Image: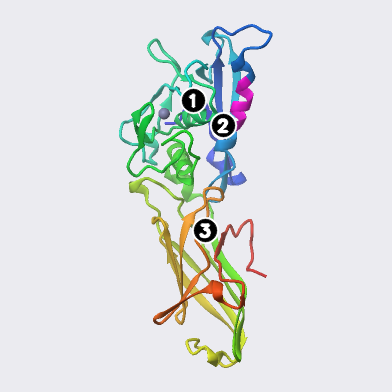
Amino acid sequence: MSSPYVTWPTAATAHSRKSIDVVVRIDFVLENELKGPPPDFRRVALPGTVKKVEAKWSGKKFKCYDFNVTIDYRIVPDRKALRPDALDVSLREDLPGYATTVAKGPDGKALSDDPGDALVPGRSGTFSESVWELGSDTMSHELGHVLGLDDGYTGSGTSTTPLPGHPLDVMASPKNAVLPETVTRAVRRNYGPSFEKAMKCPLGVRFGPSKFELVLASLDDIRLDARAPRYDPPTADPDAQPEPAEFSGTFHVAGEYLTKFPELPWAASGQADRPVKFKLDLSQEPIDLRIDLGFWLLTQKLHWDPESSLPYAEGPLVINVKDAQMDSSVMFPGPPLTPEFYDPDKDGGPVA
Ligand SMILES: [Zn+2]
């Protein structure tokens, strides 16, 4: 169940724009406002804080869709003035680092991507009220609760520890970033599995063109371009681990005196395109990239980039031939074979 105080775009709108633009409505209750001049500190500080919180939660990705959060807020003098569809939050500056958000949800489900485990924020009652302070990190953490996420830590005060298996994100500690796993959890808790079935997000990987010259022989125009028609996003939910992405594409090479490379199965000169197929198990950290060309096995470790939410390689590919290994960064004149992941719909076409 999603919150009445948060508007997620309909699935159709999100699919047509390839963007998930979330609007959170909050009425900040400013009790005992100091009437200036100068104006009450909370009134002065709030706009800048809100901008920082929006920035921390925006410019993210859910697979190939953009993910952004806007806070539609007002300052109200008391709870009688609340908009019917806005969450009420008391704005305090006398309790630095302290904040709480009224919300309901099942216990022990902090890692879950399941919509049934979403936290649902509520209005303040007789015995509970949402109270936030003016720090943007604390506010970013509380916004996570409003978006349906649980705490990712145990303990209290200054002695908290991240939950086992929880990503080190804003829900584990307010200073931390909003990570790809954080966005996955929020999006999946809102839309459920049917949403992703309708997403079309291919994933591409490429390297080259590159050159490799040896005495009396050269490999020119070494290139690879391969695509997976779909992939699953990173998640911390043990029950929702990603399926391997299945890539297929082409490895291209041209050259002279190719017989100087005895492992290559081609004629002495010319060029060749070889079909390439490989799977990427995205559930690991780091992710093991293994591109088996038959004569060369190309390997490297990958991680998820929190900004682009695409995998990136720790370094250039390692070329494995029989019992030998060679880092492609020593290839002369190069450049090294550095795999680059990309969104083929935005950045299409093989490397020129
Ligand atoms: Zn919390």
Instruction: Tell me the kind of residue under disc 3.
Output: Tyr
Residue drawn 37% across and 42% down?
Answer: 166
Left or right side of 151 for 139: right
Instruction: Tell me the kind of residue under disc 2.
Output: Val
Q: Earlier in the sequence, mark 3 or mark 1?
A: 1
Quadrant housing residue 15: top right
Left or right side of 322 for 314: right
The local crowd at label 2, few if under 14, some if 14 to 19, many if 20 or more residues have their Cα within 10 Å, is: many
**Secondary structure of the residue carrying numbered label 2:** helix
* Ligand 1 within 8 angstroms of badge 2 C-beta: no
Above or below for 305 versus 42: below
Q: Name the residue tied to disc 1.
A: 4
Calculate the distance from the C-alpha at mark 3 to the C-alpha at mark 1. 38 Å
Above or below for 21 versus 343: above
Residue drawn 45% across and 40% down?
Answer: 169
Q: Name the residue tied to disc 2.
A: 53
Q: Nearer the viewer, mark 3 or mark 1?
A: 3
The part of the chain drawn in magenta is 45-53
Instruction: Please tell me the numbered disc located at residue 312.
Output: 3
Q: Where does the image place residue 220, in percent across and percent down from the top left?
A: 63, 81
Calculate the distance from the C-alpha at mark 1 to the C-alpha at mark 2. 20 Å
Q: Nearer the viewer, mark 1 or mark 2?
A: 2
Quadrant housing residue 209: bottom right
* Ligand 1 within 8 angstroms of badge 1 C-beta: no
What colour scheme has been applied to the protein in the rendered image?
rainbow
The local crowd at label 3, few if under 14, some if 14 to 19, many if 20 or more residues have their Cα within 10 Å, is: many
Q: Is residue 21 visible?
A: no
